């Protein structure tokens, strides 16, 4: 399952935007990062289970770079977690 990263809206992420994103795997990924975030191993499991992607694949890197570029899903070195950012 791949997402066309170029078709993602270039707007701040709100709950309304999140709930309207497709595919459902993208919503699940972002929802998982809302509270405490995702450890690297948890992100890798989710990418494999929901997307059938290896963490080092170009598709996974493109997806994460696109989400980070929008400020939606970012790596936090201090907590070693990926977190979803609203607003």
Image (spheres, rainbow, N blue to C red):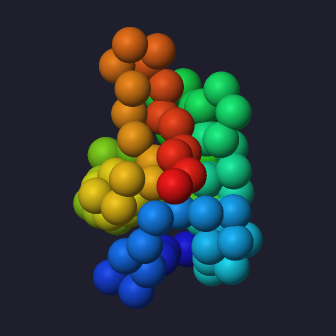
Q: Can residue 40 be seen by looking at this rendering?
A: yes
Tally of marks: 0
List the single residue furthest toward the front.
Answer: 87
- 67 lies above or below 7: above
Please give the name of the residue rendered at 69% of the width and 50% of the height, measured from the top-left corner: 31
Q: Position of residue 58 (x, y in %)?
A: 27, 60
Q: Position of residue 5 (x, y in %)?
A: 37, 76
- 61 lies above or below 19: above
Q: In what quadrant of the picture does the N terminus appear?
A: bottom right
Horizontal side, residue 8 vs residue 52: left or right: left
Horizontal side, residue 86 vs residue 58: left or right: right
Q: Position of residue 47 (x, y in %)?
A: 54, 51
Please give the name of the residue rendered at 31% of the width and 46% of the height, measured from the top-left corner: 56
Please give the name of the residue rendered at 37% of the width and 53% of the height, measured from the top-left corner: 71
Q: Can residue 49 be seen by looking at this rendering?
A: no
List the single residue furthest toward the bottom.
Answer: 7
Q: Position of residue 81 (x, y in %)?
A: 49, 25
- 63 lies above or below 2: above
Horizontal side, residue 87 vs residue 35: left or right: left
Please give the name of the residue rendered at 38% of the width and 33% of the height, measured from the top-left corner: 75
């Amino acid at each position: 399952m791949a997402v066309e990263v170029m078709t993602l809206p270039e707007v701040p992420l709100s709950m309304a935007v999140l709930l309207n994103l497709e595919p459902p795997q993208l919503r699940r990924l972002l929802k998982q990062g809302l509270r405490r975030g995702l450890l690297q191993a948890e992100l890798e499991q989710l990418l494999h289970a929901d997307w059938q992607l290896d963490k080092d694949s170009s598709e996974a890197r493109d997806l994460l770079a696109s989400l980070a570029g929008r400020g939606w899903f970012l790596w936090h070195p201090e907590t070693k977690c990926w977190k979803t950012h609203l607003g």
